[in-house]
Amino acid sequence: MKEFEYTLTDPEGIHARPAGLLVKEAKKYESKISIFKGAKKGDLKKIFTVMGLGVKHGETIKIQVEGPDEDAAAKAVEAFLKANM
Amino acid sequence: MLTLKGKSVFPGIAIGPLALFHRNTVSTAVRPVEDAEAEVTRFQKARETAIAQLQGLYDKALEKVGEEQAAVFEVHQMMLDDDDYIESVETQIREEGLNAEAAVDRTAQQFAEMFRNMDDDYMKARAADVLDISHRVEVELCGGQGIDYSTYDEVILAADDLAPSETLQLDTDKILGFVTSAGSTNSHTAILARTLGIAAVVNTGTDLHNDVDGHDAIIDGTTGTVYIDPDAETLAAMQAKKADEEKRRAALEAVRGLPSETKDGHRIHVFANIGNPGDLPQVAASDAEGIGLFRSEFLYLGRTDYPTEEEQFEAYKKTAQALGGKLAVIRTLDIGADKKVDYFGLAPEANPAMGMRAIRICLTRPDLFRTQLRALCRASAFGKIAVMFPMIISVAEVRRCKEILAEVRHELDEQGMKYDPAMQVGIMVETPAAAVLSDELAQEVDFFSIGSNDLTQYTLAIDRQQTTLDAFFDAHHPAVLRLIRQTIENGHKAGIWVGICGELGADLSLTETFLKMGIDELSVSPPSVLPLRAKIRSLDLHGTK
């Protein structure tokens, strides 16, 4: 299992379009990818869940990846977050 | 006469009969279902059709308004593909025995409610997206009779609000304009209307009903006013205003695709200034002959760490490719002064405009500079890119920049990576020092681009943000104009081209002056391209040069 934290720098937080792109990225991998905001947990492959967390600028999220391609998936999601959010 | 006040979305004027927008009423009433599995299949088929329609809308939007605005239809497809959404509908069909229409409607309400309960306005507004996509599925379930948009011909449309998908499907050659009682100027619908150039007023706060259907109306998008059953006086005034507006626009459209040349055949180039690749559709729509200033700062702003070479390469490559062989002048990093970025770790300064900024940062931290230059060189293999260094004050600085560029090219050669060896290298002339030394600097580069905003502020020692100094400020100060003339003359003596990329370039009262000085290129914001070209084409320099 891979795990990392990320603090959002995008002033708008996770808006619809970036949420869509993030989900699209996550769906490229077979591993189960979860997103945590505080006590709330959601599936990163579901757009309504990701939007519903309402992650804002400056908030920290935790990403947990578990599965056959977890190394690649964790790396890709982290790179995506850094580049876009 | 009924007068409504709303918010203007696009400053056009429309005069014509009002038509109330009717959505297909779909029946989402609960009815008994015998075969739940057949009902699930019906839902799945409708859902797939809806996704295919959204893909069609995405393609249409991509072509009409660009990727940025089209993205909403991609997000809508993903929403219809969301596992929780699908599961909710299917569970209600299987376990509660609902028909597909009712199950979709209940799911839509539940998801919309989740958004409405969120604590920020942007997320609350996403409830509309859920209802929009669900409505699309419901229409399919009810026989697939979509709204017949062709019935709206030569009318002003009145609605409570319009979904982006609805706006996009309106035939903009036939719809004169639209007015909505709700909606905001930041909605996707508003942005689409602006991009498509439809006269529109939103958020009037007044619902229009059947009693005004077909009545005469006027939208004045310049003031955000809507008149219903206008009196003769208002009608005449608006007709005159509209005629003026159309004349102005027709004059601009008439120069689209034509060269930027004076009556006596003196030709220059009119380019556009942009801040990020998202503005590329605007550049295309503006009919600019190239990009004269691409501010690369956007790559560095709003993030926590430096952008990688690959990220930069992708952005520059996209720009080069989008321009299809036209020149794109990319200015290297101009951070500092009013643009601060935390991760650069720059010390606070008493006078940032004269402090650690732009090329000074790059030459102090060459690794940073190298990364950007590598990305730029690699992208130059995919189109016509020029690189431009900002805030230059000495010949030694330019030589140092060129040395680093040569090292980067050598490195790329060794790694077998492609670049354009003929890529032009230029500098911004935005300090009095550069203007005074322009004869020497011209020996070092392929072009000059005069940054008139900074050149004015540094020459006059006046901060433009300081409104108390307005009495002392002269945008056409003779000292600045003399420096510009000198820069152009020195550039031409060395055989290089000289442009202006600051606000003065778009100042039509100076166009003739600059042309007489011999300026080769003016780079302005995309909406200023056609007005500037029209101005150039109206001039005759014969006998005045």
Image: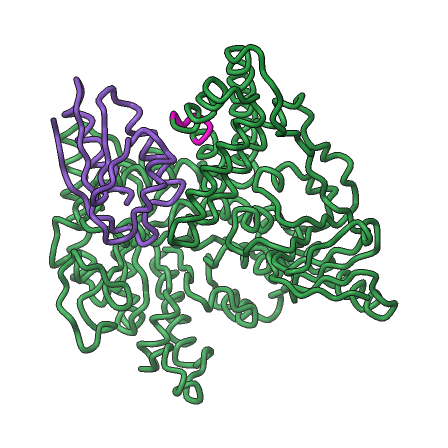
Chain colours: A purple, B green
Provide residue B254's location: percent of width, then percent of height.
68, 51
**Vertically, is B329 above or below B145?**
below
In this image, B343 relative to B75: left or right? left
Q: Residue at x 47, y 41 (%)?
A: B112
Q: Residue furthest right?
A: B232
Between residue B461 and residue B16, name the one nearer to us.
B16
Q: For residue B355, which quarter of the picture?
A: bottom left
Between residue B55 and residue B2, name the one nearer to us.
B2
Between residue B182 and residue B344, name the one nearer to us.
B182
Quarter of the picture containing the C terminus of chain B is: bottom right
Quarter of the picture containing the N terminus of chain B is: bottom right
Q: Residue at x 17, y 24 (%)?
A: A66
* Majority secondary structure of magenta residues: helix
**Vertically, is B163 above or below B401?**
above
Q: For residue B474, which quarter of the picture?
A: bottom left
**Vertically, is B465 above or below B469?**
above
Q: Residue at x 17, y 67 (%)?
A: B356
In this image, A34 relative to B325: left or right? left
Provide residue A79's location: percent of width, then percent of height.
21, 36
In this image, B230 relative to B333: left or right? right
Report if residue B262 is visible in the image: no
Q: Residue at x 56, y 72 (%)?
A: B509
The span shown in magenta is B79-83
Count of picture labels: 0
Provide residue B62's location: percent of width, then percent of height.
51, 35
Report if residue B544 is visible in the image: yes
* Residue A29 lies in the magenta-colored region: no
**Vertically, is B238 above or below B154?**
below
In this image, A66 relative to B154: left or right? left
Provide residue B124's location: percent of width, then percent of height.
45, 49
